[in-house]
Amino acid sequence: MDRYQCTICGYIYDPEKGDPDGAVGPGTPFEDLPDDWTCPVCGAAKSDFVKMN
Protein backbone atom coordinates (compact mmCIF):
# COMPACT_ATOMS: atom_id res chain seq x y z
CA MET A 1 0.00 0.00 0.00
CA ASP A 2 1.16 3.50 -0.81
CA ARG A 3 2.16 6.06 1.79
CA TYR A 4 1.05 9.68 1.46
CA GLN A 5 2.75 12.82 2.77
CA CYS A 6 1.13 16.05 3.95
CA THR A 7 2.40 18.92 1.82
CA ILE A 8 1.82 21.35 4.69
CA CYS A 9 3.67 19.76 7.62
CA GLY A 10 5.37 16.66 6.24
CA TYR A 11 3.32 14.09 8.21
CA ILE A 12 3.35 10.70 6.51
CA TYR A 13 0.20 8.58 6.48
CA ASP A 14 1.32 4.96 6.61
CA PRO A 15 -1.57 2.58 5.86
CA GLU A 16 0.15 -0.20 7.81
CA LYS A 17 -0.21 1.95 10.95
CA GLY A 18 -3.43 3.81 10.14
CA ASP A 19 -4.36 6.82 12.28
CA PRO A 20 -5.21 5.53 15.79
CA ASP A 21 -6.05 9.03 17.06
CA GLY A 22 -8.47 9.48 14.14
CA ALA A 23 -10.13 6.07 14.61
CA VAL A 24 -8.54 4.71 11.41
CA GLY A 25 -7.37 1.15 11.89
CA PRO A 26 -4.14 -0.38 10.61
CA GLY A 27 -4.38 -1.67 7.04
CA THR A 28 -6.61 1.19 5.83
CA PRO A 29 -5.48 2.45 2.40
CA PHE A 30 -5.31 6.24 1.99
CA GLU A 31 -7.96 6.03 -0.73
CA ASP A 32 -10.40 4.53 1.79
CA LEU A 33 -10.06 7.37 4.31
CA PRO A 34 -13.22 9.49 4.63
CA ASP A 35 -13.22 12.65 2.49
CA ASP A 36 -13.40 14.76 5.66
CA TRP A 37 -10.33 13.09 7.22
CA THR A 38 -7.64 15.62 8.14
CA CYS A 39 -3.95 15.48 8.97
CA PRO A 40 -3.59 14.51 12.64
CA VAL A 41 -0.66 16.92 13.03
CA CYS A 42 -1.70 20.14 11.30
CA GLY A 43 -5.35 19.62 10.30
CA ALA A 44 -4.70 19.84 6.55
CA ALA A 45 -7.30 18.39 4.21
CA LYS A 46 -6.93 14.98 2.58
CA SER A 47 -6.45 16.82 -0.72
CA ASP A 48 -3.23 18.36 0.69
CA PHE A 49 -1.52 14.94 0.65
CA VAL A 50 0.63 13.56 -2.16
CA LYS A 51 1.58 9.98 -2.90
CA MET A 52 5.15 9.08 -1.99
CA ASN A 53 7.37 7.19 -4.43
Image (spheres, rainbow, N blue to C red):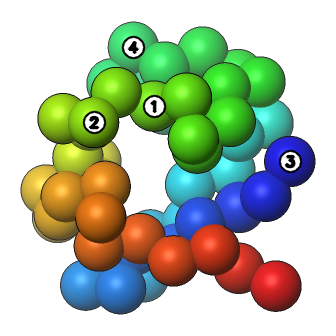
Query: Is any atom of residue 47 visible in this view?
Result: yes
Position of residue 28 in the picture relative to residue 45 (left or right)? right
Residue occupied by mark 4: 23
Residue 43, x across and y down, in percent: 13, 56
The image shows a total of numbered marks equal to: 4
Residue occupied by mark 3: 1
Residue occupied by mark 2: 35
Give the residue type that dot 3 points to. Met
Residue occupied by mark 1: 33
Q: Tell us which disc is closer to us: 4 or 2.
A: 2
- SS of the residue under disc 4: loop
**Disc 1/disc 3 C-alpha distance (Å):** 13 Å
In this rendering, is residue 19 above or below 23?
below
Q: Does the residue at mark 2 contact the one at mark 1 (Cβ under 8 Å)?
A: yes
Q: Does the residue at mark 4 contact the one at mark 2 (Cβ under 8 Å)?
A: no
Give the residue type that dot 4 points to. Ala
- SS of the residue under disc 3: loop
Q: Nearer the viewer, residue 33 or 14?
A: 33
In this rendering, is residue 26 above or below 49?
above
Q: Tell us which disc is closer to us: 1 or 4.
A: 1
What residue is drawn where x is 34% and y is 27%? 34
Q: Does the residue at mark 4 contact the one at mark 3 (Cβ under 8 Å)?
A: no
Q: Nearer the viewer, residue 12 or 47?
A: 47
Lower position in the chain sequence, tag 1 or tag 3: 3
Residue 51 occupies quadrant: bottom right
Give the residue type that dot 2 points to. Asp
What residue is drawn where x is 27% and y is 36%? 35
Lower position in the chain sequence, tag 1 or tag 4: 4
